[in-house]
Amino acid sequence: MIDKRYGVIFRQIREQKQLSLSYFEKYGVLKSNLARFERGETMMGFERVVSMLQVMNITLSDYELFFNYYLPDYQEHFLVELEKAAFSLDDMKCKKLFDEIDHSENRLLALTAKAKFDKLDQYEIEEILEYLYRVKYWGYFELSLNYDVAEYISIVEIKDLINIFEKKTSYFSDVTKYRRKIHQIVYKIILKLCLNGDEKFANELLKSTKRPERERIDFYISTLRKLTKGCVSYCFKSEQDGLLEINQSLNLLEELGNAQLKQYYLEQVKPILMSKNINFINHKFGVLKDTNRDGGNK
């Protein structure tokens, strides 16, 4: 069934930009085909719609909001609330969201909630992986599934997902919320690689995230990268330098006014520090100290 609103909303945006139907012919879209799409007589390929939105400087997120009458849909609203609870380390709120959702109709969405407060079993992990491999494009929901399943799967499976990552996210990577989620996934994978002693792959992924032009305008991503870089350094280069960079990153998060986010990432890096039998103290300001040694190279 064709939802005519896709074309209607596109027409409203096009007319607001004062662009004619023929304007898009130079981008390979026939005037007649676009007119039929706007009248709701036919659908248009996803790639084509995204490329025309880009020509008009309209993000996919903006288009989605227009489509949903400026209100986030249920799935997006659920994920936002779930992330708030997870970053606050509020397992009770995550459990509440899990209980509220209709599991029969929103099975995978329910699993994203479960992953925040409980372990996924092998069947659930395979269910998520099967879905991720099957769908052509990964939106924010699919990226959230990637984030949740990353800690459970093998290095081989991680490499398989990384190999198809760019293809499945290419149309979203410039949208801020998608880009941030992509970085969260990659940095979480790097932490797993640190725990597994895979120095080469960890460094390869860390190098792939180096985007100075973006880091200058996204303080959260640059801080998260600094934290991950500190973990890589701690595991494979200099424990002292790595610990210093981890501390600096955590304190930067607090300086941003987000102590809860700082605590969340402190919990994320604890397994790495504990894996080397480090005795550390979480002081009032969250400063980590190595009480076993004075520091130094591995």
Image (cartoon, rainbow, N blue to C red):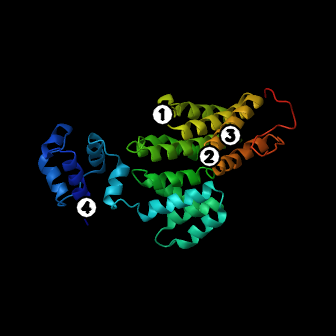
How many C-alpha atoms fall within 10 Å of the one at disc 4: few (<14), some, or many (≥20)?
some
Instruction: Establish if 230 lies above or below 52.
Output: above
Q: Is residue 211 left or right of residue 42?
A: right
* Rendered residue at 53%/32% (across/down): 208
Instruction: Say which quadrant the N terminus sits in.
Output: bottom left
Secondary structure type for disc 1? helix
Q: Which residue is mark 3?
A: 251
Residue 80, x across and y down, in percent = 51, 58
Among the two numbered marks 2 and 4 on one chain, the one whose residue lies closer to the N terminus: 4
Marks 1 and 3 sit apart, C-alpha to C-alpha, by 21 Å
Q: Which residue is mark 4?
A: 5
Query: What is the three-letter code of the residue carrying label 2?
Result: Gly
Residue 187, x across and y down, in percent = 59, 41
Instruction: Establish if 41 lies above or below 133.
Output: below
Q: Is residue 32 visible?
A: yes
Among the two numbered marks 1 and 3 on one chain, the one whose residue lies closer to the N terminus: 1
Q: Quadrant of residue 40?
A: bottom left
* Rendered residue at 64%/41% (across/down): 255
Residue 38, x across and y down, in percent = 18, 56
Q: Is residue 118 visible?
A: no
Query: What is the three-letter code of the residue carrying label 3?
Result: Asn
Q: Which residue is mark 1?
A: 214
Marks 3 and 2 sit apart, C-alpha to C-alpha, by 10 Å
Among the two numbered marks 1 and 4 on one chain, the one whose residue lies closer to the N terminus: 4
Q: Which residue is mark 2?
A: 257
Among the two numbered marks 1 and 2 on one chain, the one whose residue lies closer to the N terminus: 1
- Nearer the observer: mark 1 or 2; the answer is 2
Among the two numbered marks 3 and 2 on one chain, the one whose residue lies closer to the N terminus: 3
Query: What is the three-letter code of the residue carrying label 1?
Result: Arg
Query: What is the three-letter code of the residue carrying label 4?
Result: Arg
- Nearer the observer: mark 1 or 3; the answer is 3
Marks 3 and 4 sit apart, C-alpha to C-alpha, by 47 Å
